[in-house]
Amino acid sequence: MAREPVPCAVRAAVALQAGDVQTDLARPGVAVIDVVFPQAGAVGLQEIVFKNFYTAFLTIRVQRRSPADMAGEGPRKWVTCLRNYCLMPNPHTEEGSQDYFSVFRHQMLCDVDEVMAIRMILRQPSPVWLHFTIEELQIYPRGQESPQKDFQSWLSHLTSQEQPENLHGDGLKQTPLYDFHQQHGGKMVPFAGWSMPVQYTHSHLESHMHTRQHCSLFDVSHMLQTKVFGRDRVKFMESLVVGDIAELKPDQGTLSLFTNEKGGIIDDLIVTSTSEQHLYVVSNAGCSDKDLALMQTRAQELRAAGSDVHLEVWENALLALQGPSAVRVLQAGVSDDLAKLPFMSSAVMDVFGVPGCRVTRCGYTGEDGVEISVPARRVVELAERLLDDPDVWLAGLAARDSLRLEAGLCLYGNDIDETTTPVEASLVWTLGKRRRAAMDFPGAAIIVPQIKEKPKHKRVGLMSTGPPIRQHTRILDLEGQTVGTVTSGCPSPCLQKNIAMGYIKSEHSKVDTALTVEVRKKNYSALVTKMPFVPTRYYTIK
């Protein structure tokens, strides 16, 4: 069946730059496009395709047909179906920083059948105004596959008009370091419901390389920190995760996974068995609501059955000091010997005069480093003390993402989600040996057999030629047949090569398998590559 876009029209277009009367002073620029369907009235969405200029964060809201609408009971409500999706176009084109992007039905957070209007909101990560816009927008109805033909120009050069209502209604949360970030030149962007720095005064590349060569300080206070108390705390946690929590030594931690009964990954998290007789759990900000609900519900079920377990959300701030000189910098402010603190171990100590800090030797960059849970009221003081060392730079989300990709680490929502199992995600090592044998974790009946039978597809690393490859890029075999999809990708600052990870059919997953990737309707050579792309430098004691 031929693929044809549904006819649509712009109802309103807005472009606001930083400092406009409609926005707060020094807020990033905002572009808004409202789209309606004059012929169809309402459509079921399959895919939205467009060309984007400059890095932006995209939120999509829809108005849907409902019985109340048919009865004429007032205006339809806007429903958010995609929130703060990062668009990072290829900066290495003759025409400047631009790229084609697709947003698919399965990415939406709500039902997208019977859609009568779409609002696309693009927020710029920098307070420096760039005339960013989108072009060649096409909207495809449910059931149609991706286009294999050239786009036709549809929208360009937005003009300032009246701002649509409820534009800034997301209510972004702020970490205790919000003012600190702005004072230090942080460029704030929406991320997982929080206002977070994407970078500071140094470029993304400079920040990335400084972390690899020296060390950087990241604010990760948006992550959910939870304490689990009670004599049945291990039983509670093992009823939710795949790891062997019972085998952890005092103040030892492990990366584990919340899984569902279908074997899908609900979230990844770090669980530490503390010497203070509780579990310390750190999980992702973007999953905090569902993680907390999952844990609270299970705790209530176990208490109703007579178990002793209860939760406490820890309102501490969280700093990550990452890089080869991180431990040297921290050692100057603690009395504990950090040479005795190996990777994935933890201890409570005073840090530069701030008491009661939990220091865990871990991170999300592949480098040696620590995460410091610190009382929120004193986190600015501690951050300033760490910055007194000239080796320490502030770093934001941009460097954090490229660093974790070089280290082959998954980003939840991109590389793992509730449709991927630990085996498909190449995370079999998170499954405790005892837990595999007992098959007593959620989804074990699906996950454990996959270890021997092999999944139909699995996560692999890729290196490619040509333009950088991004999320949703098609992966093909040498005969041109689709064998997988990219989930994360970027140019590697350390390797000066394009790197990515994605899911491909298992028969093509062997390292050094030659493949191709499709970028803007052209094919480029790619090679299945062992991860991590850049060797990790975690500190272990032999």
Image (cartoon, helix red, strand yellow):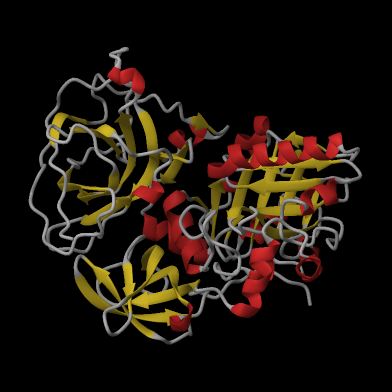
Relative to the observer, which residue lies in front, 494 or 450?
450
User: Which residue is located at x 59 percent, y 56 percent?
Assistant: 265
Res. 508 in view: yes
For the image, the number of numbered tags is: 0
In the image: residue 54, left or right of residue 398: left
Nearer to me, 353 or 221: 221
* Along the line of sight, the residue nearer the viewer: 538 or 146: 146
Residue 44: percent from the left, percent from the top? 29, 41
Q: Which residue does the image show at 76% across and 34% down from the upper left?
A: 312
In-image side of 57 versus 356 (left or right): left
Quadrant in the rendering for residue 467: bottom left
> Please, is residue 542 above or below residue 149 in the view?
below
| Quadrant of the frame with the N terminus | bottom left
Q: Residue furthest left?
A: 153
Residue at 15 percent of width and 59 percent of height:
2
Q: Looking at the image, which residue is at 23% across and 34% down?
A: 42
Q: Quadrant of residue 295?
A: top right
Residue 185: in sight, yes or no? no
Horizontal side of 354 relative to 31 (left or right) equals right
* Percent coordinates x, y for residue 149 in the rendering: 13, 62
165 over 193 or under it: above or below: above
Which of the image's four quarters has the C terminus? bottom right
Residue 450 is situated, as x and y percent measured from the top left of the image, at: 62, 73
In the image, residue 351 above or below residue 480: above
Instruction: Residue 472 in the image: state x and y as whole percent.
Output: 34, 61
Left or right placement of residue 354 versus residue 308 in this view:
left
